[in-house]
Amino acid sequence: KGKWGPLGGELLHFSYGRCTMMHIVRDGANGGAVPLGGRFLSGACRGRFNPKDGHLYVTGLLGWQTSAIRDGCLQRVRFTGEPIRQPIGMKIHANGIRLTFSTPLDKKIAEDIDSWAAEQWNYKWTKNYGSKDWSVKNPAKQGRDAVPIQSAQLLPDGKSVFLQMAKVVPVHSMAIQYNLDTTQGKIFKGTYYLTVNEVGKALEK
């Protein structure tokens, strides 16, 4: 905390299979993952912060089902001070989802619903390995459901956007795509993957 900019004090998670790292954004029992840039040479398994320099040191290995290109790795990740443009907070409401970004957003682009897209799906828990994507609206049907975004409102802090939806329900997986501009005109886009376990009160606008 205090050495990683907007990520200071937050939770990081490694992907062994994809040799990458992500930021875990939480709201009580709800949580989601935002991919961070860069790739490790091997399957990232263990990370530790050095209290002396504040840098993150990561070890990895090559094994079953990983995209690693080396047998192992010991690599450093440090915060350079360059701007980070991504979601860093969320809040689940009965009538939509509020996403907070690490940088002020261009109001016109943020409130354009064409800057956003969302879909959701569930998994089936069985004795089999893995699961197909299953519709939330029709549990017997494979596939994902589009989640219409009725409106997008930039909140007074200039960094948070409320995405109004007809009804938010608990779901194993939701993906929110964004294509935004900062107030400095820097374009950035990505996908935020989240799980909804608990739905809070409706946000009154």
Image (cartoon, rainbow, N blue to C red):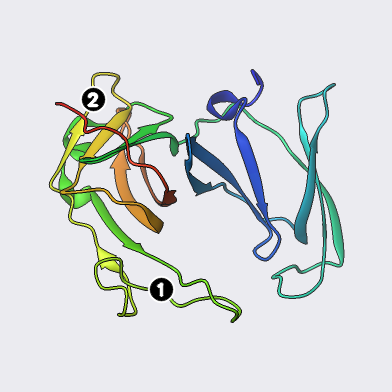
Q: Position of residue 113 (x, y in %)?
A: 16, 47
Q: Position of residue 147 (x, y in %)?
A: 23, 58
| Residue nearer the viewer, 170 or 166 | 170
Task: Check disc 2 and report the residue beneath it.
Answer: 155
| Label 2 residue SS | loop
How many marks the image carries: the answer is 2
Image point (30%, 19%), residue name = 157
Task: Report whether 101 appears left or right of 48.
Answer: left
- Residue 182 in sight from this viewpoint: yes
Q: Give the quarter of the image for residue 4.
A: top right
Task: Check disc 1 and report the residue beneath it.
Answer: 133
Image point (55%, 30%), residue name = 82
Image point (69%, 70%), residue name = 67
Q: Amino acid at mark 2?
A: Leu
Quarter of the image where the N terminus is located: top right
Q: Give the quarter of the image for residue 156.
A: top left
Image point (86%, 61%), residue name = 72
Quarter of the image where the C terminus is located: top left
Q: Is residue 34 above or below residue 156?
A: below
Q: Amino acid at mark 1?
A: Asp
